[in-house]
Image (tube, helix red, strand yellow):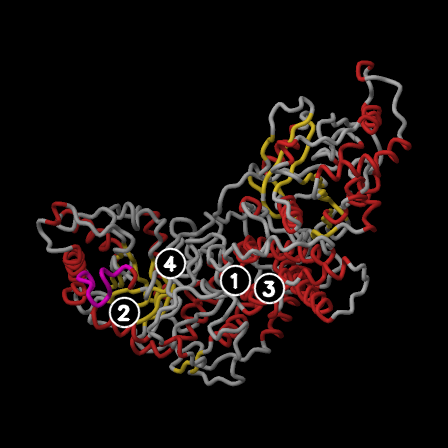
């Protein structure tokens, strides 16, 4: 079936997804059912009448500033020298009434760094194909060149090279051009200073000369001062901008990004100001959906913060969207809708407010609430962002059901991180101690490893793990309109979260802030508290869990879509978001379960409203773990998987699957700080801790070790007589001393251990589980934890090292290594 998850096929050194073998007719029937269901859902949203109508001479289209983020597997806007051009993206522009595409990929080295070099025959063939496709679809193809890094404006040779390069592209069929002088140092060479009065005069001279040489085609220029923030000293008094306005040929359009490089709003007043200075209306180079500055974010929200009142005052708008082509449907579609409207359906006075609001609390929409009321009926010439989003989702949904193949692993650009090593509960040597080889609850005592079958129950429960959801029906697997609405809300806009994203922030923050209500009720020993405040807390905790389940369902639906190209574009972001929300939900469950909650993490010292990382980072910052950024750096799976792991507090019913003779002390004496992780089959791991290691060891000696000593008599041997590992463990029960060195306890008062089955392939599970455990300890006043690991267990030493643990007191014990971290 199409919905079944792929297996992995190794071809040479590459890894490719392999799908179950099915007949062509079966696959066709399944696809047909999914597409039919999709269109039925899409019909619920009314299309707008003027969706495919061009708005006169208003330039409207796309800027492409990056080549494909994955090399050689498909075509997208601006992909050159990789694959044969395909008309798909350009056909969509034409379909939506857009008319322009500006080719300006900074990672095409012949566009920027080596702008003087001509294209080879093969390169020319590909670029000609892209231009021909644009012409075929009625799209004006602007070829942009960025010579500003090293051009000598006064050199006739340099200007001739510039003309020669653009002449070559004109022979490919290109009839529109642009020169980009953005993101360069505004300094001239000594040779240029002898010829030109200013930097602006130099750019104007070259631009005008090239414009005339090419026969005065359609032409754009991106200035060095391309936004108000870069205008010196300001827009009105900028000598540079005023020179461009006065000297540049009036037929050349000038690009502008607004108040900032990424402008939250564009006001009528600001556009009138720049128009007056440039002596022509600007073409807006709009970066509102650009994500190349932050690889943790993608923007799926509607075109917003720009009133249709601006349209008569602009020459046009070109959007510079996400790096991932598949993620740009909403951005481009809603811009197309906006360009054909002349009435602001969301008349917000702040849009025309001359006071710039650079930063806005992301808990609010532009209306100051968690959502926007969309009028029940909107005329075709009226624009409202939320309604535009609905229309875009309506047309985007069928795209997910169009079968598209993809080759190779996901290669989303991001930080290179060391892969977390899964901790095997049952290593190659079948030992009783294997469940706790991550750490022990003892201090300086030797950590013996013995053979035992204590973990057989857990091994049986967790041995047969599968990623398939074979019992689900096609309808249950199908992505829905509601799924996409949630997806867009989770990844909305640079300065604004979507309504459901805001709800997540507010619910979690409220639950965390009011957890003391539940704690007090738990301390009173009430199994079913009746206080209305406590009841409300659990109701809102249930609401958060419902949101978490909806996100899980979205994640699974997305994983099964036939369009693997779209999946590969969105999967890394959705995988990360799902994990963070699941972590929050796990922490809230612990707060409801905990009897020792404290307000130490409610100091308000952390500022959550910073933009980098988007909603994912905002949610992460609400977890009370300082200095834990490394625990939030994850590498997504190379191949998409629908596998979901859930972290939750340990419950008494888990005892048979988790219990071992060493971790039993944690379960019996410190159950409040015990977490388990499970998949759809059962438990696959745990993380256990004690808040105060000294007190914990005293309780072990008084309440737990005596029972172990009765159960396991001391062997009648000494270490010199060569004890077996079972005998070493039995001897350890009788000789254990829980002395924690003060040098360790002073900074790391808590002790922990953890373990995962080797079947857990998701390398982020260990980090998320540890994060939840550290948050629980932090909420109860602890700021440091240590783990005692056998010095012989190199695997475990490396594992803890990759979780940010450092060796404490080297040389303290030849048999035990102490590893700790603060948080």
Disc 2 and disc 1: Cα gap in Å?
29 Å
Which mark sits nearer the N-terminus, 1 or 4?
Answer: 4
Residue at the spot of label 1: 491
Which mark sits nearer the N-terminus, 2 or 4?
Answer: 4
Residue pictured at 82% horizontal, 50% vertical = 652
For label 1, the crowd category at 10 Å Cα-Cα, with few meaning under 14, some 14 to 19 and many 20 or more, is many
**Secondary element at image label 3:** helix
Which mark sits nearer the N-terminus, 3 or 2?
Answer: 2
Disc 1 and disc 4: Cα gap in Å?
21 Å
**Secondary element at image label 2:** loop
Residue at the spot of label 2: 282
For label 3, the crowd category at 10 Å Cα-Cα, with few meaning under 14, some 14 to 19 and many 20 or more, is many
For the residues labelled 4 and 3, say whether their Cβ atoms are less than 8 Å apart: no
Looking at the image, which is closer to me, 252 or 586? 586
Residue pictured at 83% horizontal, 14% vertical = 721
- Residue 603 appears at what percent x and percent y? 56, 55
Disc 1 and disc 3: Cα gap in Å?
13 Å
For the residues labelled 1 and 4, say whether their Cβ atoms are less than 8 Å apart: no
């Amino acid at each position: 079936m199409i919905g079944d998850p792929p297996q992995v096929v190794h071809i040479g050194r590459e890894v490719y997804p392999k799908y179950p073998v099915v007949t062509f007719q079966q696959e066709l029937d399944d696809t047909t059912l999914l597409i039919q269901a999709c269109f039925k859902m899409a019909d619920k949203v009314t299309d707008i009448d003027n969706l495919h109508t061009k708005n006169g001479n208003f330039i409207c289209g796309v800027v492409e500033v990056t080549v494909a983020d994955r090399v050689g597997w498909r075509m997208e806007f601006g992909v050159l020298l990789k694959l044969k051009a395909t008309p798909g993206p350009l056909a969509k522009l034409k379909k939506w009434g857009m008319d322009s595409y500006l080719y300006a990929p900074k990672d095409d080295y012949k566009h920027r760094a080596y702008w003087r070099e001509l294209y080879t025959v093969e390169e020319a063939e590909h670029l000609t194909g892209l231009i021909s496709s644009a012409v075929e679809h009625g799209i004006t193809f602007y070829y942009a060149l960025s010579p500003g890094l090293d051009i000598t404006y006064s050199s006739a040779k340099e200007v001739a090279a510039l003309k020669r390069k653009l002449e070559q592209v004109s022979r490919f069929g290109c009839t529109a051009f642009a020169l980009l002088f953005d993101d360069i140092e505004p300094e001239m060479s000594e040779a240029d200073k002898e010829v030109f009065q200013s930097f602006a005069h130099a750019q104007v001279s070259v631009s005008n000369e090239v414009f005339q040489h090419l026969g005065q085609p359609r032409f754009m220029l991106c200035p060095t001062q391309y936004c108000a923030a870069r205008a010196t000293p300001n827009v009105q008094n900028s000598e540079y901008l005023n020179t461009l306005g006065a000297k540049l040929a009036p037929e050349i359009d000038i690009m502008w990004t607004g108040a900032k490089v990424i402008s939250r709003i564009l006001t009528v007043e600001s556009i009138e100001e720049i128009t007056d200075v440039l002596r022509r209306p600007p073409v807006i180079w709009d970066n509102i959906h650009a994500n190349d500055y932050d690889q943790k974010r993608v923007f799926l929200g509607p075109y917003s913060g720009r009133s249709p009142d601006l349209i008569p005052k602009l020459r046009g708008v070109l959007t510079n969207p996400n790096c991932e082509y598949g993620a740009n449907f909403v951005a481009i579609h809603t811009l197309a809708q906006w360009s054909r409207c002349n009435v602001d359906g969301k008349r917000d006075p702040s849009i025309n407010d001359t006071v710039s609001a650079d930063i806005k609390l992301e808990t609010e929409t532009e209306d100051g609430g968690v959502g926007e009321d969309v009028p029940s009926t909107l005329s075709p010439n009226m624009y409202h962002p939320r309604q535009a989003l609905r229309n875009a989702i309506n047309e985007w949904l069928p795209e997910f059901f169009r079968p598209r193949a993809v080759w190779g692993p996901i290669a989303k650009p991001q930080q290179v991180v060391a892969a977390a090593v899964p901790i095997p509960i049952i290593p190659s040597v079948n030992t009783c101690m294997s469940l706790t080889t991550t750490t022990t609850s003892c201090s300086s005592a030797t950590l013996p490893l013995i053979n035992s079958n204590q973990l057989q129950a857990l091994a049986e429960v967790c041995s047969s793990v599968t990623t398939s959801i074979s019992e689900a029906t096609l309808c249950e697997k199908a992505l829905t309109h509601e799924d996409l609405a949630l997806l867009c809300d989770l990844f909305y806009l640079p300065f604004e979260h979507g309504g459901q994203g805001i709800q997540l922030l507010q619910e979690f923050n409220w639950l965390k802030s009011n957890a003391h209500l539940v704690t007090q009720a738990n301390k009173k020993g009430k199994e079913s508290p009746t206080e209305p405040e406590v009841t409300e807390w659990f109701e809102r905790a249930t609401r958060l869990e419902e949101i978490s389940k909806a996100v899980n369902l979205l994640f699974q639906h997305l994983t099964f879509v036939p369009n693997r190209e779209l999946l590969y574009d969105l999967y890394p972001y959705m995988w990360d978001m799902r994990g963070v929300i699941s972590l929050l939900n796990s922490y809230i469950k612990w707060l409801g379960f905990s009897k020792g909650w404290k307000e130490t993490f409610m100091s308000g010292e952390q500022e959550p409203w910073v933009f980098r990382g988007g909603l994912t980072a905002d949610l992460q910052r609400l977890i009370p773990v300082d200095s834990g950024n490394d625990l939030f750096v994850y590498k997504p799976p190379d191949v998409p998987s629908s596998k979901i792991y859930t972290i939750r507090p340990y419950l008494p019913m888990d005892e048979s699957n988790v219990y071992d003779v060493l971790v039993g002390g944690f379960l019996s004496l410190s159950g409040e700080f015990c977490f388990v992780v499970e998949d759809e089959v059962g438990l696959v791991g745990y993380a256990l801790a004690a808040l105060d290691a000294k007190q914990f060891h005293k309780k072990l000696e008084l309440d737990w070790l005596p029972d172990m000593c009765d159960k396991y008599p001391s062997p009648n041997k000494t270490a010199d007589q060569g004890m077996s590992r079972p005998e070493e463990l039995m001897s350890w029960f009788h000789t254990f001393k829980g002395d924690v060195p003060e040098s360790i306890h002073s900074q790391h008062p808590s002790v922990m251990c953890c373990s995962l089955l080797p079947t857990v392939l998701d390398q982020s599970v260990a980090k998320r589980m540890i994060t939840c455990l550290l948050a629980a300890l932090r909420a109860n006043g602890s700021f440091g934890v240590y783990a005692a690991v056998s010095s012989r267990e190199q695997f475990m030493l490396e594992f803890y090292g990759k979780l940010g643990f450092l060796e404490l007191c080297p040389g303290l014990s030849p048999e035990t290594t102490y590893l700790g971290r603060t948080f």
